[in-house]
Image: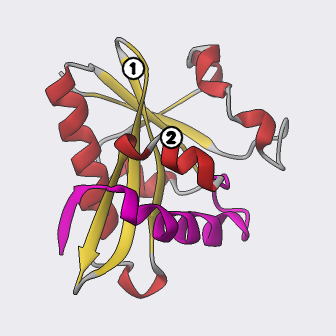
Amino acid sequence: MIVQKASLKDVPQIHQLVNSFAERGEMLARPLSELYETIRDFFVCIEDGKLVGCSALHISWSDLAEVKSVAVAEGSQGKGVGHDLVQACIEEARSLGIPSIFCLTLRPHFFEALEFTRVDRNELPRKVWTECYRCSKFPDCDEIALIKQIS
């Protein structure tokens, strides 16, 4: 398994993977155009030449970034792919000098195993809610907010 920065050729596979989870209500759908615009946020995991997972680190402000679009193909779950992808986001945030990263998730235990801690969503700056209006669950969000200090 290799975790690396995503490239433009990865966009169709990221789109298919993320939206397969979105169709089940497990994450926010991402339009193809948005993925091309934000490709520099993404990491991918490649196994045997095939994209099996992705994650993104989106900078919100000078002191805060979001880990989002963490998706691992069904056949590759439980092998540490998600862990390695989120770890890549953490390392990038650290290298950029971003002291805090957060996520919104339906799987808080996964992130808690990576030393994220739960916080009240209202503690996050309003800017982080810019995508919420696109969600079918808005305004009745059932995602859990977690944050990690990187210092």
**Alpha-carbon neighbours of circle 2 within 10 Å: few (<14), some, or many (≥20)?**
few
Q: Label 1 sits on what residue type?
A: Leu
In this rendering, the answer to whether 58 lies above or below 30 is above
In the rendering, at what x and y percent does residue 119 appear? 52, 28
Q: Nearer the viewer, residue 102 or 136?
A: 136
In this rendering, the answer to whether 27 lies above or below 66 is below
In the rendering, at what x and y percent does residue 101 appear? 37, 30
Q: Does the magenta stretch include residue 46?
A: no
**x 53%, y 50%: residue:** 35
Q: Nearer the viewer, residue 137 or 38?
A: 38
- Secondary element at image label 1: strand
Tell me which segment is drawn in magenta.
Answer: 1-30
Q: Is residue 80 visible?
A: no
Disc 2 versus disc 1: distance between alpha carbons? 20 Å
- Horizontal placement of 94 versus 65: left or right? left
**Alpha-carbon neighbours of circle 1 within 10 Å: few (<14), some, or many (≥20)?**
many
In the rendering, at what x and y percent does residue 126 appear? 64, 15
Q: Which of marks 2 and 1 is nearer the N terminus?
A: 2
- Horizontal placement of 36 versus 127: left or right? left
Q: What is the image's colouring?
A: secondary structure
Residue at the spot of label 1: 64
Q: Nearer the viewer, residue 109 or 15?
A: 15
Q: Label 2 sits on what residue type?
A: Glu
In the rendering, at what x and y percent does residue 139 appear? 85, 35
Foreground mark, 2 or 1, reads 2
**x 84%, y 50%: residue:** 136
Residue at the spot of label 2: 37
- Secondary element at image label 2: helix
